[in-house]
Amino acid sequence: MAEVKLTQVNKRYGNIHAVHDVDLTVADEEFVVLVGPSGCGKSTTLRMVAGLEEISGGTIDIGGRVVNDLPPRDRDIAMVFQNYALYQHMTVYDNLAFGLRNRKVPEADIRKEIDRAASILGIQPLMARKPKQLSGGQQQRVALGRCIVRNPAVFLFDEPLSNLDAKLRAQMRIELKELRTRVATTSIYVTHDQVEAMTLGDRIVVMKDGLVQQIGTPLELYRTPANRFVGSFLGSPAMNFVDVTVVQKNGGLVLSDFGADIVLPDAMAAALAGHVGKNVVIGLRPEHILMGEGSSEGTIRLDGSIVLTEQLGAQQLVELRVGERTVMAAGVDPDLRLQGGDAGRFSIALDRVHVFAAGDSGPVLWSAGKGQVTAPLRHVS
Amino acid sequence: MSVATDTGYTPPKRGSFLDALAPGGKRAFFLLSVLGVLLIFAFPVFWLVLTSMRPAWGVYYVHRGLEFTLGNYLEVLEQEVVVHAFFNSFVIATLSTFFSLTVTVTSGYMLSRFTGKLANAWFGTIYIFRTIPYITWVLPLYFVTQWWGIFDTYLGLLLPHIAVHICFFSWLMKGFFDGIDPSMESAALIDGCTRWGAFLRVALPSALPGIAALSILCWLWTWNEFLFALILTSHNTPMITVVMAQFVSELGTEWNLMSATAVMAMVPALIVAIFGQKYVVRGLKV
Ligand SMILES: Nc1ncnc2c1ncn2[C@@H]1O[C@H](COP(=O)(O)OP(=O)(O)OP(=O)(O)O)[C@@H](O)[C@H]1O
Ligand SMILES: [Mg+2]
């Protein structure tokens, strides 16, 4: 039971600045997910918390104790690795007992702990086997068991599900969720899979190039991404981005060149007043692009043609061409008969639209329903 | 990344010249090559065994006459120097295997897991020594052993062997450790081990097949080694490979005795090789 606090944490490998001024507080029993593309410094951050990498700058505090100079064994943590990292030459039982034996726990207590963990994870029949004789899912459960028996202050996970096939991954994700209700421990979970991040995390930390992009609950990040990168990273199918220009017209502001001019309501115009003549990017979630007229108030209407459709059973995905741009719409009624080449009219509620400054990590200028976002955001140059 | 596998693209199969042969022809080709290789390697051994059982007058006509004898073996074993040499070779091979493996395992581990000044310096050192041809070591070593007063002693032969082994086998050992997942050691560190503990209790046991294979190769290498044995020893510590060569004298070569010694020298090597084959194959696969 402990709070984990990272203050201005940095990691440099020679010239590579792998982790850049990370500030993060994980509350007691909170489950925080670090997510981001490959090479963004998630593992490095986690390994610094574990004590497996030295910290180049800043402090890490676990349960009120600065651990910068403590070796991993004194930090009261447990970690699950991507490739399970089970001790190949030991049986499952010995794998689970290893950490406890190192702490000189009496053998009878070890047995009790292992029985408890094994019944939670359903691995009792595997105790005498060697790791090579287990399937990927079983190995992952044993790796989880090795953490549970230790009763650590903090669980650390480094992409624990990424070596499993899609179906097993979905199943283990649910098991992890259930596990949380039984074993409530402060956890930091690294993944590059946005579905895992959305479903598992109490809060999500999105990282890119060693920098924290945004921290928040899954819905906060989904609804009000702080920049274009966060918007693009979370959500599937991914957010559509359309480059447009802010233009002064008839005494108001319009976004030009995505179908007809999009006339901006006052609040939005105020938020974008400083960008007249500049390029900005509209972010549209596919599920917010609706077929048909939509309600009359505050709606963008677009006339375009259908490029192709993808029938998923529960919904259809429709790729639309508007002028020279294509966007993806989701959540279309699966019974609707649509064909490539059909013309169609689509609508987007203006209060669902995000507007970002130009660039891959352009900060948000206007976000759905929230008005102007003022939080200062650092983005990568 | 399952997407990439669904592209339906299969790379064109590269044709080998064997595909041009009919299935039967392929098999015959295979058998012939195996036979050819066997002949090249096995025939000399066969001839050697034959020679070792022929009386002295029959060695040049091994293929003629049917008179066979074990007398050569008895005659060789009556020579004290031969028995002594067998013993010495065994001791040197075993001791040098033990000591060089102890160093090689730690040095291979270091090369595999650590970067930094010390590791780089060590890497550079053994790299340089490795590139020096084996034979150029001998003369300097001769002078050094003379100078240290360990010429023609166990120590005088052990130390050079160990030095060579370290340079040659650290690389193989590094390869074994490269094949072992380092996150296993990270897990051990978190589970309460020190860095040494993680090495000794987790990395080392996983490398055991490789270490076993290397011990066998190392033992055989030393047992069969000739050059160091020839230059760095004299009458006090005769080695079997050298003694064998001494059947060549001004009066001619006693092929039958030499062959008998050679056959006997092959036996321990054969036993080690047969017993260890399983480990060598498994270990080198790691
Ligand atoms: N030992 C090292 N030496 C030098 N650079 C390193 C080292 N380890 C990591 N890096 C660099 O640090 C950056 C962050 O690496 P890290 O492993 O934390 O990425 P990650 O977010 O976990 O990515 P992935 O999803 O691929 O695991 C990368 O650019 C990587 O090249
Ligand atoms: Mg990683």
Image: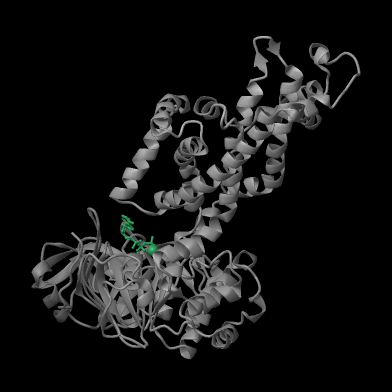
Residue A89 in percent (x, y) is at 58, 64
Q: Is residue B224 above or below residue A241?
A: above
For image coordinates 17% across by 79% down, the residue present is: A372
Which residue occupies the foreground of this view, B18 or A254? B18
Residue A134 in percent (x, y) is at 62, 68
Residue B277 in percent (x, y) is at 68, 44
- In the image: residue B93, left or right of residue A256: right
- Name the quadrant where ligand 1 sits: bottom left
Quadrant of the rendered image containing residue A42? bottom left
Which residue in the rendered view is the most extreme toward the right? Answer: B66
Which residue occupies the foreground of this view, B140 or A299? B140
Residue A101 in percent (x, y) is at 51, 78
Which residue occupies the foreground of this view, A78 or A329? A78
- In the image: residue B165, left or right of residue A329: right
The total of numbered circles placed on residues is 0
Which residue occupies the foreground of this view, A240 or A71? A71
Q: Is residue B32 visible?
A: no
Colour treatment of the image: one colour
Q: Is residue A123 above or below residue A302?
A: below
Quadrant of the rendered image containing residue A77? bottom left
Q: Is residue A279 visible?
A: yes
Which residue in the rendered view is the most extreme toward the top? Answer: B251
